[in-house]
Amino acid sequence: MLRVLLVEDYAATARLIQTLLERGESRAFDVTIAGSLHEAERLLITGLERDAILLDLGLPDSNGIETLDSLLRFAPGVPVIVLTGLDDESVALKAVQHGAQDFLIKGEFDSSRIKRSVRYAVERKRVFSALGESGVLLDGVLNSSRDAVMALEAFRNGNGTVQDFRWQLANPACERVLGFHARELVGQSLHTVMPYAKRDGLFDGLVGVVDSGHTLDVEWPMERHGQEVWLHVVAVRLADGVAVTMADVTDRIRATRAPSPAVRNACGASLKP
């Protein structure tokens, strides 16, 4: 059973969400409701253990991103899903940048969607926490690899469609291969760092990995410090996200595309008067 803290001040909305979560499936969800940020913090301080939190950003005693920031201080290891109105999607996107796992637009989700969002959030947190806690062995593998190694989580809209990815982990080789230091990547979105990923097909390829479970194995061109480079990209599904390796294969690509010395000599000879 997944234990959920629902922080929502409007009683009718809170009851509806509680019903959507607890309906069927032999009570796979146990929902506790708090009507204010203060009440939620009091419950957490007094020992309430939850697997996930559903948080309305507009509460009587707190509003906006500050609501999320305050709650995360009391529940730093618990995945938070933000609830927002139709006109607040930009705020919800900012909330994700501040540490929320996902967001749901009120009135645009059903029982299946909200359950899936909670399960994905819990699983993502578990997997990426395990990666972060695997210690010296993981650090050794990442730091010694000449290839860029990274983990990105999927960012879905209210309908469950993947709209972006967010870096959760990146190794030192990312600076050499991608031109970005690891600290510039972690916490950032794919579209922010690599706006050309959508145009060049990488984004759609990663979405395919998440949705189908198939492995992506492609050679992909990107711009690094104003120059085109070619990367060999391999991506596999990791929870509701992807684990990716990227190797610089620019020299090999250029060599296979460039004419051989014999061909160059022949071409040169044919141009001579």
Image: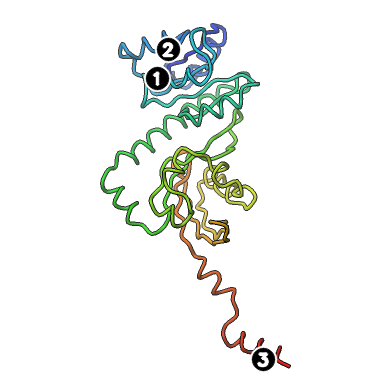
Per the image, label 1 sits on a secondary structure element best described as: strand
The kind of residue tagged 2 is Thr
Mark nearer the viewer, 3 or 2: 3
Among the 4 quarters of the image, the one containing residue 151:
top left
Image position, residue 206 (x, y; %)? 54, 47
Residue at x 53%, y 9% (from the top left corner): 15
> Vertical placement of 46 versus 146: above or below?
above
**Which of disc 2 and disc 3 is earlier in sequence?**
2
> Vertical placement of 192 versus 39: above or below?
below
Tell me if 43 is positioned left or right of 11 in this view. Answer: left
The kind of residue tagged 3 is Ala
Image position, residue 18 (x, y; %)? 50, 14
Residue at x 47%, y 50% (from the top left corner): 180
Among the 4 quarters of the image, the one containing residue 47:
top left
**Crowd class of label 1 (few under 14; some 14 to 19; many from 20; radius 10 Å):** some
Most extreme residue toward the right is: 273
**Crowd class of label 3 (few under 14; some 14 to 19; many from 20; radius 10 Å):** few
Image position, residue 170 (x, y; %)? 41, 46
> Vertical placement of 148 versus 264: above or below?
above
Tell me if 143 is positioned left or right of 250 in this view. Answer: left
Q: Which mark is residue 3?
A: 1
Q: Are marks 1 and 2 in contact (CB under 8 Å)?
A: yes
Q: Which mark is residue 269?
A: 3
Q: Which mark is residue 34?
A: none
Residue at x 53%, y 18% (from the top left corner): 64
Q: Which residue is mark 2?
A: 32
The kind of residue tagged 1 is Arg
Taking depth in this image into account, of 259 and 32 the one nearest to the observer is: 259
